[in-house]
Amino acid sequence: MKILVTGAAGFIGMHTAERLLARGDTVVGLDNLNAYYDQNLKEARLARLETSPDFRFVRLDVSDRAGIEALFASERFDRVVHLAAQAGVRHSLQNPHVYVDSNLVGFVNILEGCRHSQVGHLVYASSSSVYGGNTKMPFSESDGVDHPVSLYAATKKANELMAHTYSHLYGLPTTGLRFFTVYGPWGRPDMALFLFTKAILEGRPIDVFNQGRMKRDFTYIDDIVEGVIRTLDRVAEPCPDFDPAQPDPGRSSAPFRLFNIGNSRPVELMDLIAAIEKATGIAARKNLLPLQAGDVVNTYADTDRLDNLLGYTPQTDIDTGVGRFVEWYRRYYRV
C-alpha cells in the first residue's frame, strides 16, 4: 500500500515508518521539522528512513491547508497514519495557539484530505491525557473523558470528536489510539526518561515532581508500533451492537473506534529512576518538587478491547525497555 505517515521525523513516526517499509509498503513521510526540540535528532531519524527507496519525505506543516490539499490530490494514499501534532502537556500552558494550529486546524486538514481522496482508513494518535481528572482505574475507552486538565488533552479529545463526525457523515473509517507514556530508543528529549538519563550521566540532579508520588503506564515503542500496524490493517467498522440510548464513547454506529495502547502495568516514578540507575550504574540525585500544573498523578490503561479485537497486548517490562533506551542514548550521544 501507499501510506502517508505524518510526523515521520518524530519518535513514533520514525519507528512506524520503518516497520511499514520493512514489510514492503511505500511510505510518504510528512513533517515540518519544527524547533520544539532538537532538530538534529529529527534529521537523524529521517536519515534512517531515507535509506529505503520506498520512502519519500515531504516537508510540510499539517496546518498548511493548500499544501495538504495538493498532497492528497496528487498522491492518492491507501491509508493514513496521522502522528503529527504539537506534543507536550507542559508546553501547552505557555504556547496555546501552537496547539490550535497543529492539533485542531492540522487535524481537520487531514480529515478533509482523507475524505476527498477516499482514503481507506485513517489511524491517528490520541493520548492517555484525555482521561484528565478521572480517578477510576484502569482507564477504559468506555469512560467519559469530559474533564481534561491541559489544553493538549483538550485538543486530543477534540480530535476524537472530529474523527467521529467524519466517520458518521462521510463513512471515513477512523481509529484513534490513546497512547500511554511512550518511551524507548530515539525518544523525545522533553520526556522524563530522556531528561533523567541525560542529567544522571552528566552528574546533575533530576527534578522529580509530586515528590515522586506518580505512576505512569510506560509503554515501549515497539509495543506501540505493533498496535499501530495491527489497527491500521484492521479497518474500522460500525459496531453492530452500539446502543444510542447508552452510547459507549469508544464505539459507534459509524466506522469509528478508540483503543488504549498501554502496558497495563503502571510504574512508580521512583521505580523508573531506579531502572535508569541500574542501566547507567549511577545513583541519581533528586530534587523533590510539587506536582506541576496540567499533570495527572496516575495513568493506567485497560487494554481489553485491543486484546479482544487483535489478540495483542504490550509486553515489554520497564527494566528491559529502559536498558535499551540507555544503550541507544550512550551510543547516539557517545557518552
Image: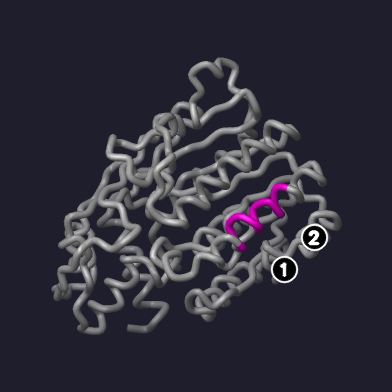
Q: Residues within 10 Å of mark 1 (few under 14, many from 20)?
A: few
Q: In front: 130, or 263?
A: 130
Corner quadrant of residue 103: bottom right
Residue plotted at (74% across, 51% down): 2
Q: How is the image coloured?
A: one colour
Q: In front: 112, or 13?
A: 112
Q: In front: 56, or 264?
A: 264
Q: Residues within 10 Å of mark 2 (few under 14, many from 20)?
A: some
Residue plotted at (69% across, 38% down): 166
Between discs 1 and 2, the one toward the N terminus: 1
- Callout 1 amino acid: Val
- Callout 2 amino acid: Leu
Asked if residue 5 is among those painted magenta in the image, a careful observer would answer: no
Horizontal and vertical percent for residue 155? 52, 52
Horizontal and vertical percent for residue 51? 65, 70
Left or right, residue 198 beside residue 165: left
Q: Quadrant of the C terminus?
A: bottom left
Left or right, residue 192 beside residue 50: left
Residue plotted at (53% across, 63% down): 86
Q: Please, what secondary structure does the residue beneath circle 1 have? A: strand
The numbered mark at residue 58 is 1
Q: Residue lying at the far right in this picture: please name it.
A: 74
Distance from disc 1 to disc 2, alpha carbons, whole Å, reads: 9 Å
Identify whether 281 is placed above or below 23: below
Q: Can residue 212 be seen?
A: yes
The numbered mark at residue 163 is none
Horizontal and vertical percent for residue 283? 14, 73
Horizontal and vertical percent for residue 286? 15, 72
Asked if residue 103 is among those painted magenta in the image, a careful observer would answer: yes
Q: Which span of residues is magenta-colored? A: 101-111
Look at the numbered discs 1 and 2 and tell me whether their residues touch, using CB distance below 8 Å.
yes
Residue named by callout 2: 71
